[in-house]
Image (cartoon, rainbow, N blue to C red):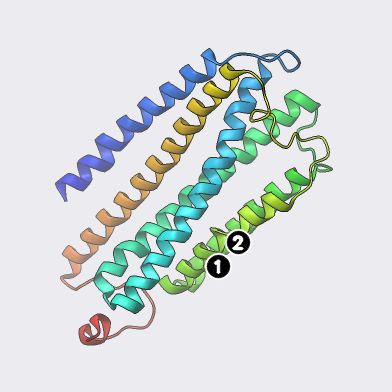
Amino acid sequence: MSKLKRLQQQVLPILALGLLLLLVLWTVLAPSESRLGNVIKVVYVHGALVWAGLLTFSLAGVLGAVALAVRYLVRSAGRAAVWYRGTQAAALAALIVWIVYVISSMVVTSMAWGQLIAWNEPRVRVTALILVAAFLLALVARLVNHPDFTAGVNLAMGIVPWVMVQQVEAIRHPVDPIGGSESASIQLYYLLILLTVIALAMTLVAWLWVKAERKAISLRDHSGMPLHTGGPSRSPTQEEGP
């Protein structure tokens, strides 16, 4: 318990702070662009956030699939409970990252196009739809309060946003403005920003997961009973299987 407490309260916050400082450094040092000027620096972070959000949704889906596999194939409720908490932590982190991405999208469109919300742009509408879907599914999962349902929802959200983003058309939004750039400097700094933002997202997942583990241990210690992942109560024999 002390190791988890130190991880949550010291190691991960310090890591997050260091990554934030690195992000600021890369953004300040990143080159400007001939047409957008320094606005391109906000675009770097904006582009990195969409990748970080999609990858975090995918991580939640993978952890959900692992939880279901451990629960029903390995038939170990105790070990599955850890993965269930992991998929919930990753799903919450993905929602947080996507909210930040939506905010960055409004900042970018305001600075580049003079619109706070460019609703006529298909990519903007898809971004909003993903946010609404993630929020509503998280709310429904919380109301249902069954780990299998939550894992299934996260598995679906690990796939659907990728499909939506890949199929959407672009009107004014460039398809791949940085990847298509001939500037090696622009691509290098964008890569540094991208890796840093993804690392921040993974740090958030880890922090939420550790927090959930600490809460689970605390509940177990107070109740003196093995922890269940939710759903109908079963006997210890039924939980562990043969």
Secondary structure category for the residue under label 1: helix
Is residue 56 depicted above or below 143 in this figure? Answer: above
Percent of width and height locating residue 62? 44, 60
- Residue type (three-letter) at the residue carrying disc 2: Leu
Task: Tell me the tag on residue 113.
Answer: none
Q: Residue at x 55, y 48 (%)?
A: 54
Task: Tell me the tag on residue 136.
Answer: 2
Percent of width and height locating residue 157? 56, 60
Q: Are marks 1 and 2 in contact (CB under 8 Å)?
A: yes
Relative placement, left or right, of 143 versus 204 is: right
Q: Dividing the image into 4 quarters, which one contains the C terminus? A: bottom left
Percent of width and height locating residue 37? 70, 14
Closest to the observer, 162 or 148: 162
Is residue 238 depicted above or below 62 in this figure? Answer: below
Q: Is residue 128 visible?
A: no
Relative placement, left or right, of 132 versus 200 is: right
